[in-house]
Amino acid sequence: MDQSLPFYRDGLGLPVHFDRILDGAYLPTVLGLDFTAIRAVYLTLPGGGFVELLEYRGLERLPAASRPCDFGAGHLCLYVQGIDDLVARLRQYGGKPRSDGPVDITSGPNAGARSVYLLDPDGYPVELFQKP
């Protein structure tokens, strides 16, 4: 959380809706995991919705890294403006682009747009998509 929260809050500019510890006795049972608590941070998305960051405490955790083609892989796609500046800023917060930087989309229904996939500090893929 110490690395991911600044990435989303400061790098992407998403305001924190709440930041709290979840420690209800039902949680380990419903999730099927043996842990002590979860730090949950909800960040507000422009136009509605949230990005939910969860930090499980009291058990081993592994990076979220996967390839886009792997079973169970997911990603968060955000429409953005000023994609070049945003990628540069996110690099400062631990973002690692899968390409050298934003890529021009040259064909299909999104021709003229630009896109980049980068990994957040936990290895979770975030797509930034700038419309034409």
Image (spheres, helix red, strand yellow):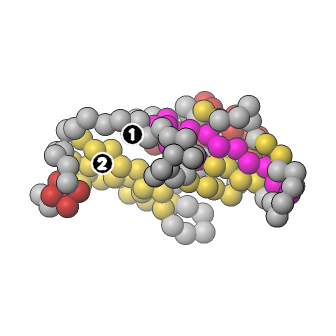
Q: Which percent across, then down, holds residue 69? A: 57, 47
Callouts 2 and 1 close, C-beta under 8 Å:
yes
Disc 2 target residue: 39
Give the spatial CA distance, label 2 vs label 1: 8 Å
Residue at figure coordinates x 50%, y 40% from the top left? 66
Is the residue marked by circle 2 packed among few (<14), some (14-19), or many (20+) residues within 10 Å? some
> Residue 62 magenta-drawn?
no
Say which amino acid is labelled 1.
Met
- Is residue 119 in sight in this rendering? yes
Disc 1 target residue: 1
Residue at figure coordinates x 63%, y 56% from the top left? 78
79 relative to 48, above or below: above
Query: Magenta stretch?
Result: 111-126
On the image, which quarter does residue 35 sit in?
Answer: top left
Q: Earlier in the sequence, mark 2 or mark 1?
A: 1
- Is residue 9 in sight in this rendering? no
Farthest residue to the left: give it.
Answer: 25
Tag 2 secondary structure: strand
Say which amino acid is labelled 2.
Arg
34 relative to 96, above or below: below
89 relative to 129, above or below: above
